[in-house]
Image: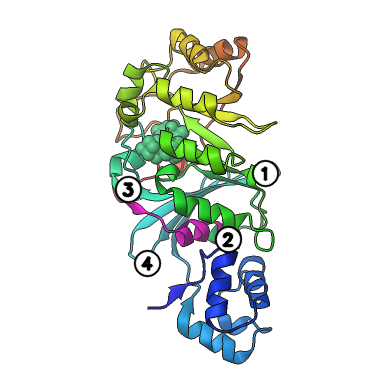
């Protein structure tokens, strides 16, 4: 079977090129064709000798997942449904916002963590995405929009820190200067709180912006909402984040899905403020996206604003993030291909 050249880092490409007894500058040529010109057929890479083009074609592919569907939302975001080689499906969302365009990508097919408010969690875990499949989402989005994609968030399907190596490798390729040259500051990893992987990230990749889905300020509520809390309870998670080496001018983002009568009371807000006091952070409140499959509800607007006001009064930068793409099932927690 042919192997893929997509999803290889510059060093890995160099290895392949050496195997073919080609000079190392071929790597830069390939990177230019693939990542800058986005040409995916060796045949069109006209500054490579014909013999090499034929050899590459014999040994490697540059194939991308298939786009099965693109749905446009009234709020200008759009959702792509992609089919992978083994017919598994994933989704990604492109969200234009002023002169910013954010791409929300998936890291797994499904998710093993089973948070009760999230449809991806409900569909269970199918498999990790390969580095190529993660990178391909960015490539396909780029090919299908005239806008420049300025930001990437790992907030689609799956838990990125349970697919650590592939996610980090994809980020390495996205930020490679000769290739896409995306800035590391514009890529956010969102995690439900996989403590050992947060520690690993802190040691090696603390310059990648980190978002942590907190969603509760006491263990009882968090155990109920997010089963991973039984493995890594709040005290351990928060202790880990207190020690996390946050670089200057950066902050951790706490995400907090507000769910009616579960985690939305004034005392929840006060507990949250106490819990994360002293951590360099900002808070994104995400009103729960309702869906028929899940019997939970969004708080009313007044409760949401009060929650925000309380946190602001405790000096936390706190934003209310309205989810995009609700009408196309593209909003946070609504991505679950096999349930649709
Ligand atoms: N697994 C990672 C990243 C994907 S989930 C994580 O949990 O952080 C991305 C975000 O969507 C998380 O902050 C999660 O709390 C939020 N989310 C999940 N279901 C939601 C829902 N029904 N309504 C609003 N936000 C939701
Ligand atoms: Fe997985 Fe994140 Fe959904 Fe929880 S919220 S089930 S961790 S994708």
Q: Nearer the viewer, mark 3 or mark 4?
A: 4
Residue 134 falls within the magenta-colored stretch? yes
Residue 224 falls within the magenta-colored stretch? no
Graded by Cα atoms within 10 Å as few (under 14), some (14 to 19) or many (20 or more), the crowding at tag 3 reads few
* Percent x, y of residue 89: 37, 57
Tags 2 and 1 touching, CB below 8 Å: no
**What residue is at 51 percent from the left and 40 percent from the top?**
201
Q: Judge from the rendering whether residue 157 lies leftward or rightward of residue 19; answer left or right.
A: left
Does the residue tagged 1 have its C-beta within 8 Å of any atom of ligand 1? no
Q: In this view, does 122 lie above or below 7?
A: above
Magenta range:
126-139
Q: Name the residue under label 2.
A: 144
Q: Distance between the residues labelled 2 and 1?
A: 16 Å
Q: Name the residue under label 1.
A: 100
Q: Distance between the residues labelled 3 and 4?
A: 20 Å
* Percent x, y of residue 313: 61, 9
* Percent x, y of residue 105: 49, 49
Q: Give the label on residue 340, or none.
A: 3
* Percent x, y of residue 270: 49, 9
Look at the numbered disc 3 and give the secondary structure of its residue: loop
Residue 265 visible here: yes
Does the residue tagged 4 have its C-beta within 8 Å of any atom of ligand 2? no
Q: How far apart are marks 4 and 2 (CA)?
A: 20 Å
Residue 194 visible here: no
Q: Earlier in the sequence, mark 4 or mark 2?
A: 4
Q: Which of marks 3 and 4 is nearer the N terminus?
A: 4
**Magenta segment main secondary structure:** helix
Graded by Cα atoms within 10 Å as few (under 14), some (14 to 19) or many (20 or more), the crowding at tag 2 reads few
Graded by Cα atoms within 10 Å as few (under 14), some (14 to 19) or many (20 or more), the crowding at tag 4 reads few
Q: Give the label on residue 85, or none.
A: 4
């Amino acid at each position: 079977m042919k192997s893929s050249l997509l999803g290889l880092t510059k060093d890995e490409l160099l290895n392949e090129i050496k195997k073919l007894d080609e000079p190392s500058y071929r790597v830069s040529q390939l990177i230019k064709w693939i990542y800058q010109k986005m040409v995916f057929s060796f045949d069109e890479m006209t500054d490579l000798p014909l013999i090499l083009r034929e050899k590459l074609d014999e040994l490697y592919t540059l194939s991308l997942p298939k786009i099965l569907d693109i749905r446009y939302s009234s709020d200008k975001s759009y959702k792509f449904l992609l089919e992978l080689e083994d017919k598994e499906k994933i989704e990604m969302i492109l969200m234009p916002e002023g002169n910013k365009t954010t791409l929300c990508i998936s890291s797994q097919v499904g998710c093993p963590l089973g948070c009760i408010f999230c449809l991806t969690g409900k569909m269970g875990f199918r498999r990790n995405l390969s580095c190529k499949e993660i990178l391909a989402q960015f490539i396909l989005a780029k090919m299908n929009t005239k806008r420049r994609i300025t930001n990437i968030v790992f907030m689609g399907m799956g838990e990125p820190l349970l697919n650590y190596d592939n996610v980090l490798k994809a980020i390495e390729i996205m930020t490679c200067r000769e290739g896409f040259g995306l800035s590391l500051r514009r890529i956010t990893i969102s995690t439900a709180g996989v403590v050992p992987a947060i520690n690993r990230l802190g040691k090696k990749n603390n310059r990648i912006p980190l978002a942590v889905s907190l969603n509760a300020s006491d263990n009882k509520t968090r155990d109920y909402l997010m089963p991973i809390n039984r493995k890594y309870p709040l005290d351990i998670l928060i202790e880990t984040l207190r020690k996390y080496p946050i670089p200057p001018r950066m902050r951790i983002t706490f995400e907090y899905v507000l769910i009616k009568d579960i985690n939305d009371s004034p005392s929840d807000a006060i507990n949250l403020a106490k819990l994360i006091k002293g951590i360099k952070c900002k808070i994104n409140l995400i009103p729960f996206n309702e869906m028929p499959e899940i019997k939970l509800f969004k708080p009313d607007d007044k409760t949401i604003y009060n929650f925000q006001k309380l946190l602001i009064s405790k000096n936390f930068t706190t934003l209310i993030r309205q989810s995009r793409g609700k009408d196309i099932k593209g909003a946070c927690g609504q991505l679950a291909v096999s349930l649709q």
